[in-house]
Amino acid sequence: ETGVTQTPRHLVMGMTNKKSLKCEQHLGHNAMYWYKQSAKKPLELMFVYSLEERVENNSVPSRFSPECPNSSHLFLHLHTLQPEDSALYLCASSPAGRNTEAFFGQGTRLTVV
Amino acid sequence: SQQGEEDPQALSIQEGENATMNCSYKTSINNLQWYRQNSGRGLVHLILIRSNEREKHSGRLRVTLDTSKKSSSLLITASRAADTASYFCATQGAQKLVFGQGTRLTINP
């Protein structure tokens, strides 16, 4: 248990659906991240929030929309996804502005059908 | 890009042997970290080595960092079946933690 909780753990959605992934941490961290992990590819950094402000957006398609309402919660809103978006989506948190470790959630396994 | 590249991509050894994984990166960094991932699960932090450090130990883990060669190695001594997992290096610059593709380590009993 890392202190970072992701829900749901598994999600199957159609290409026309709208769904949201949730990430929650109560570690007192103020930086949160979304990563995408596809088979045989490196972890791709999607978004970084520091102090609730988005500081990184790695050319992610607009069908992925992040939201960080406070330093403990992070969402990833999904709409009109494609089958190639099927992957493990990992949330992580860390203290902002310091060189310390990141704590990862268990991930959401997303399948787009 | 600061992306680390691990070598080898896959490693299979006998229990009790030592496992060495290497990581190379491209730009200057603040620190380099190693993580472990069991199949389909989240990543777990193993060890962090700062750019001004050359070697660090944690239990059966030994990490080295050579900033002149932009490379790092992770040594796991006296491997156990439970060490079977994927291992990733990650380089950290300003606010970003960027991962490599990982090494898949299999320990055979």
Image: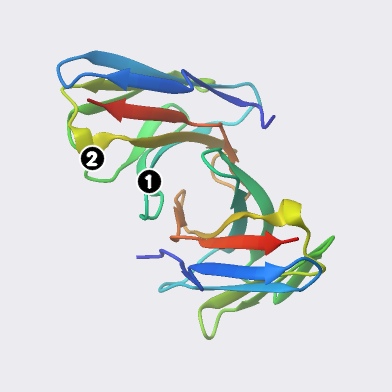
Q: Quadrant of the C terminus of chain B?
A: bottom right
Q: Amino acid at mark 2?
A: Val
Task: Sort mark 1 into few (<14), some (14-19) or many (20+) by Cα contacts within 10 Å.
Answer: many
Residue B62 percent across, percent down from the top left: 75, 69
The residue pinned by badge 2 equals: A60
Residue A75 relative to residue B108: left or right: left
Q: Tell which circle, 2 or 1, labels the residue nearer the N-terminal end.
A: 1
Q: In the picture, residue A12 is in which quadrant?
A: top left
Residue picked out by circle 1: A45
Disc 2/disc 1 C-alpha distance (Å): 9 Å
Q: Is B92 or A98 nearer to us in this picture?
A: B92
At 54% across and 45% down in the image, what residue appears? A97
Given residues A39 and A76, the one toward you in this image is A39
Question: Which numbered marker is on residue B48?
Answer: none
Residue A69 image-quadrant placement: top left
Q: Residue B22, located in which quarter of the rendered image?
A: bottom right
Amino acid marked by disc 1? Leu
Name the residue located 69 percent from the left edge and 29 percent from the top edge.
A1
Q: Is residue B45 left or right of residue A113?
A: right
Which of the two residues, B91 or B103, is positioned nearer the viewer here?
Answer: B103
Secondary structure type for disc 2: loop
